[in-house]
Amino acid sequence: MSDRRRAKLLPIDRWPTADEAALSRWFSPVQLGPVKALTRTWIPAMVPWRATDDGFVTDDVIEWYSRFAKGRPGVIVIEATGIRDVPSGPLLRAGHDRFVEGLAKLTRAVKQASRGETKLFVQLIDFLNIKRRPTRESFLGRFLTITPRLRSALGTSFATVPEADVRAHLLSLPDDAVLAVLDEREAEALRFGLRERVTDTHLPHIESLPRVLPALFADATKRCVAAGFDGIELHFAHAYTMASFLSARNTRSDGYGGDRTQRVRLPLEVFHAVRAAAAPSVAVGCRFLADEIIEHGSGVDDAAFFAVEFARAGMDFVSLSRGGKFEDAKQPRIGHAAYPYTGPSGHECMPTTNIAAPGPFGRNLGAVAMVKRALVDAKLETPVVACGGIASFQQAEAVLAEGAADVVASARQSLADPDWFEKVRQGRGDEVRRCLFTNYCEGLDQAHQAVTCQLWDRAKGHADDATVRRTKDGRRLTAPPAAP
Ligand SMILES: Cc1cc2nc3c(=O)[nH]c(=O)nc-3n(C[C@H](O)[C@H](O)[C@H](O)COP(=O)(O)O)c2cc1C
Ligand code: SF4
């Protein structure tokens, strides 16, 4: 590794001995409602792009999670899994009973690989429609609705001319002139692709979300419980439907938007429906944002308020992420959809070594500590899961010692080396394959390609080199085995 790259690694003075690890907080048990996790180590949801195009579990999905399970973390959260029975590409789905068999195979495999020690949760997600960025020709020539407002913006001579003439005129205009007559949403649809919002209540399927979502989440929960999951994590984070209800940008006027008490109403109704649908032995909690990091978005005060509401309602854990919004995402290329991890808030969600001071490590911890403090002040003991640039034993131990959180999660470090929890437990921390935090993996996620780690292919001579499954372009699909 080059000196420049080494200089950017998270500083680590020394790894613990096996005895120190055994006595540590991080490797001590934690009660998550009805579920006892054997350690406070946690692998948060990471979409690996390995499901079939119609959302079924594949052998590659099973291998991906079994490989994580060999490192025996306290909890693994399975990737964002769709609650609806609608096409959504190679992302797992739980929107119909036909998905239960594959999910059950997955839970059995993970339990076996961890020798029954890892608890397996699943993250349940709903998302709204988003279209790819259109060409100028297709947008102005076909998709754009020619409204009376647009005709009047073009001038009185366009009041009654046939639609085809309006489109031909728009196509003849320079870009600036087109943008000058489009309203904000039309201009966004041209520049980024059409994206629905929870505030689009003129659309019946958006207006009815508060009526349909609790049952959709509850039905998906029943299937996941039947498949053998130990816990349900409701995805209330990042750019998706439920996070948009929590957002300060949610101005719905039907009692589900506006002030915080109204914004948290649907998430609570979803939780109550899910709690009622889940067996009492199953933990139910959520992942949401400690800070949206967008202009006019929710901040840490909102997060503290939501955490207290969720805890009072009886959630078994709250897990905190950061950023990851559409509102500041970069303009996609034509034919591609906007991706919520390309702007500043996306960079906060999965920070790299290029992020501004204080750098990528533990960047979310200040906000997480404030949320935890609000819970403590309200005399609520609901465990809080911290995440974001945590990749060493010392960091995790310090978080727990300070009481900033109760569980410490690690996504990319666990991807780089799924055995790292096991190595640390055995006093073999020096052997950990350390994440570089440069987001090669996240780039693959963005391109909707099978997620792998750049480090897996760097070294050769592994016992499974001849047999390991690979992508078409030759990348290993699972991490190399740990040395004996
Ligand atoms: C490839 C990839 C896929 C991800 N998929 C999800 C997901 O499905 N749901 C989610 O809440 N977060 C997802 N995340 C975010 C991670 O759970 C985590 O919050 C983020 O990587 C920051 O933690 P880290 O610094 O430990 O990596 C994903 C991250 C990566 C790298
Ligand atoms: S590709 Fe590997 S090393 Fe790079 S950020 Fe992702 S997990 Fe870390």
Image (cartoon, grey):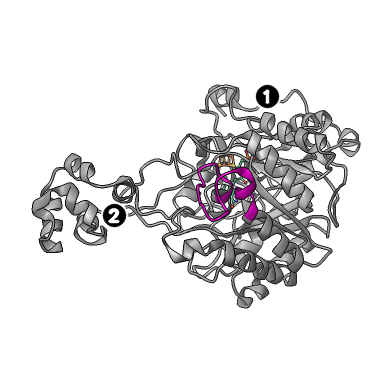
The foreground one among 122 and 15 is 122
Label 1 neighbour load within 10 Å: few <14, some 14-19, many 20+: few
Q: Is residue 211 left or right of residue 66?
A: left
Instruction: Please state the horizontal and vertical placement of residue 299, each as a whole percent of the image.
Output: 59, 35
Q: Residue at x 12, y 60 (%)?
A: 160
Q: CA distance from mark 1 to mark 2?
A: 45 Å
Left or right: where 257 falls relative to 410: left
Q: Residue 229: name its quadrant.
A: bottom right
Nearest to the eye among marks 1 and 2: give it. Answer: 2
Q: Which quadrant of the render holds ligand 2? A: top right
Examine the rendered structure and indicate whether residue 229 appears above or below residue 240.
below
Residue 116 in the image: state x and y as whole percent: 83, 60
Q: Quadrant of the N terminus?
A: top right
Q: Amino acid at mark 2?
A: Pro
- Magenta segment's dominant SS is loop
Q: Which residue is mark 1?
A: 11
> Is residue 453 covered in magenta?
no
Q: Which residue is mark 2?
A: 134
Residue at (12, 48) in percent of width and height: 155
Q: Residue at x 43, y 41 (%)?
A: 329
Please tell me whether mark 1 sits on a helix, a strand or a loop: loop
Q: Is residue 73 visible?
A: no
- Looking at this view, name the residue that lies furthest to the bottom: 98
Q: Residue furthest left?
A: 157
User: Where, by quadrant of the figure, is residue 148 drawn?
Assistant: bottom left
In magenta, the rendered stretch is 245-265
Seen in the picture, residue 98 relative to 126 is either above or below; the reply is below
Q: Residue at x 60, y 39 (%)?
A: 322
Q: The residue tagged with tag 2: helix, strand or loop?
A: loop
Does residue 94 appear in the picture of this structure?
A: yes
Does any atom of ligand 1 lie closer than 8 Å to the CB of label 1? Answer: no
